[in-house]
Amino acid sequence: MASKKELLAQIDQVKSTSKERKFNESIELAINMKEIDLSDPKNRINEEIPLPKGRGKDLKVAVIGTQEMTGKAKGSADFLYGPEDLGKFGEDKKAFKKLASQVDYFVAESTLMANIGKSLGQVLGPRGKIPKPLPPGQDPSGLIVNLKRTVRARSRDKKTFHVPVGTRQMDSADVAENINAVIRRIVGKLEKGYGNIDSIYIKTTMGKPVKLSLEVLE
């Protein structure tokens, strides 16, 4: 197995060869799979992976619940909505689609999930943003903190998919730790493990991809 130093060198290469932008670019993996039938949904990757060193950027979490739950979420959630807001969202799907594009994760009181699925499932389902249910009145703060450092890996029916692992401004050692966490989770879900990985590239949002040596991964 190659050393961690080699992985750090590849991350540094991505940073140094990518043009400086006016915003903090994400660093992401492009994972190419092989010898896997993705027409069968059970073979698809659909994982939410907490990054040990965080995303390096602020993620938005919305809570939908009674006053008791939303009161406890103040200070940790970015958006707070009550049961009365569900009707408004259902009547104005265009406005809710705009909101859904701004929110990375939704959390909802379990008693509201049926109503949410019925009125908003068409918007949230395809985006992979069905709310995380919590028991009535439970404090969602801990879950929110965890979600803010979590990435979603979804292959759908494509053999190539992308997963963010940090930002350009993050320390390369932290990005490397995140990369290993993502790859370990994904490889663990594949029937043949690394045998189902064709190649992995790392890149900034608008930069050129650099092929990652699989040997440098833990």
Image: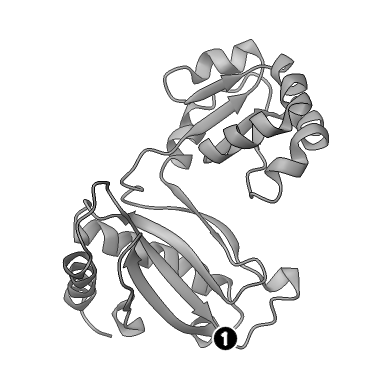
How busy is the neighbourhood of tag 1: few (under 14 within 10 Å), some, or many (20 plus)?
Answer: some
The residue that mark 1 highlights is 34
Image coordinates of residue 57 in percent, x first then y, are 34, 43
Note whether 42 is above or below 200 in the view shown. above
Colour option used = one colour
The kind of residue tagged 1 is Lys
**Quadrant of res 168:** bottom left
Note whether 157 is above or below 123 in the view shown. below
**Quadrant of res 17:** bottom left
In what quadrant of the picture does the C terminus appear?
Answer: bottom left
In what quadrant of the picture does the N terminus appear?
Answer: bottom left
Image coordinates of residue 65 in percent, x first then y, are 65, 20
Asked if residue 41 lies left or right of residue 104, the reply is right
Query: Camera-side residue: 59 or 50?
Result: 59
Q: Residue at x 71, y 25 (%)?
A: 89
Image coordinates of residue 143 in percent, x first then y, are 51, 35
Does the rendering let one see residue 210? yes
Does the rendering let one see residue 103? no
Image coordinates of residue 33 in percent, x first then y, are 54, 80
